Amino acid sequence: MLNLALSRLHPMGDQSAVADHGLPSGVNVDSFAGPVHVEWDAGAAMTPLGQLPFFIDFLKTAGLFDAFVADCPLQYASPNAPKKRDVLGTTMLSMLSGHKRYAHIAALRGDGVLPELLDMSKIVSEDAVRRALKAIDEDEGAVWLRRHLDYCTAPLLAEPWILDIDTTVKPLYGHQEGAVVGYNPKKPGRPSHCYHTYSMAGLRLVFDVDVSAGTEHSSKHCAPGLWALLDRIPRDQWPVLLRGDAGFGNDPIMREAEQRGVAYLFKLRLTSNVKRMIAKLSAQSAWINAGQGFEAKESTVRLEGWSRQRRAIVLRRRVKGTLAASVTDEHGQQKLSFVEVGADAEVYEYSVLVTSLDEELSAFGQLYRDRGDAENIFDELKNQWGWAASPRTTSRVAAWLHALSRCSMTGGTFLRVSPSPTAIWRRSPADLCCCTLSPRVCDMRDRRRLRSPVHTPSRSPSPRRFTPSPRFCVT
């Protein structure tokens, strides 16, 4: 059994204080069009694209965007077709701008600065992007995008890490492949897609995503992608724990994890047999404090259809105060009833976990509660990175950009991009390395002055040297 070092994976404590040095007077960053100068003005109107030069600097320094374009399996036969770099650059800029529809690409057509910084000739139309993504073979496109996703996340796997598995539903409003009516709790009866996502706990880094039809939401449709992901990772870099909700607490998933030697922690549905186990344990004493008001007790259980007994962790928390219950009467009207829980009454809410971890009982409460952070990944990718309306290919592109944003490092200076692609924080204004001013200045205070002449040195500036590194640091 695996002894999990929780202190290394999830250190407790508040975030360290960050000194506020105020807005810098200006910094110089590199781009595919040469060095640019960025200035801040607290009194000017804010633009959501003002921070992209930093991200473009990172892409050029690491060589990621050039490799991404070069490996793309998109092929054109017509001499009038757009360039691959223009198509992929337009797609990336659209996602970084928070667009959710192909039609939103039109908002970028008038931008004359960002395409130049990415060494693009122009912003292509929404139809060109749609036709290009349709022309990419699905299998070849998946291999291409997974290779670049793995390149961004592979350096982090040397440390102990937890793999979170989860599924989200994306309602659909058009006629798309796989748009069928299935499990859709937010909009019942609406066709949908299911996104099976595999991510690193704590860092919110997405390793891969599988887009399935709306009816393929169960764990058996997620399992092939999960085991394929582990097969692509070297055995000594596998996660120390697989973690998922009640949808993954079934015998096929757990049996496969046991055969592969991977520890797991899943939630169990409160079936009749599970409730009988809870009833037996509730009559016993000596419950262990599991934090956040929860108590824990363990047992072993073998449910119907299971191949063996497994360790079960029962968590309970006492409910106090006033409870509300909504009841529908015979006329279809909902009525709200309140129930007062007295001080002498003991009312508990229960949840049950199943695991193969050989860990202290008190650790499981917090260990599973940390899984709730996986829901924030869906919020970020759906609402801020284009998953809300993206097909199979662009969903992986969004995941690639999401991974890049959390691993970005510019010129040796550590940066952390927020969940929103419209904001960025720096450690210290003096940390950024400077380069010689270019005749072109990128002034983010006024888009009408994005290209203004400045004094040029009499002699040619020395070229800026970068040392590409395969390691990325996340703060």
Image (tube, grey):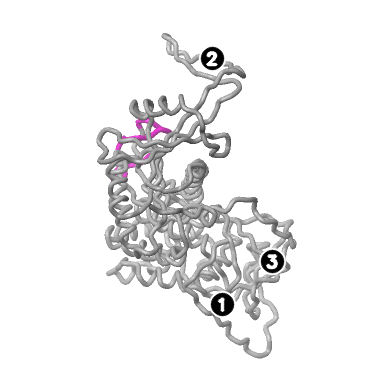
Q: Earlier in the sequence, mark 3 or mark 1?
A: 1
Residue situated in front as seen by the camera: 273 or 196: 273
Q: Earlier in the sequence, mark 3 or mark 2?
A: 2
Q: Is residue 168 visible?
A: no
Q: Which residue is mark 2?
A: 337
- Is 250 left or right of 366, judged from the image as shown? left
Of circles 2 and 1, the one toward us is: 2
Quarter of the figure with residue 170: top left
Amino acid at circle 2: Ser
How many angstroms separate mark 3 from mark 1 (CA)?
A: 24 Å
Q: Earlier in the sequence, mark 2 or mark 1?
A: 1
Q: Which residue is mark 1?
A: 34
How many angstroms separate mark 2 from mark 1 (CA)?
A: 67 Å
| Local crowd size for mark 1, using a 10 Å CA cut-off: few (<14), some (14–19), many (≥20) | some
**Rendering coords of residue 168 (x, y %):** 40, 43
Q: Relative to residue 462, is residue 148 depicted above or below? A: above
Q: Which residue is mark 3?
A: 428
Q: Which residue is located at x 33 percent, y 28 percent? A: 273
**Rendering coords of residue 262 (x, y %):** 35, 53
**Rendering coords of residue 225 (x, y %):** 31, 53
Kindly state the secondary structure of the residue where label 2 is placed.
Answer: strand
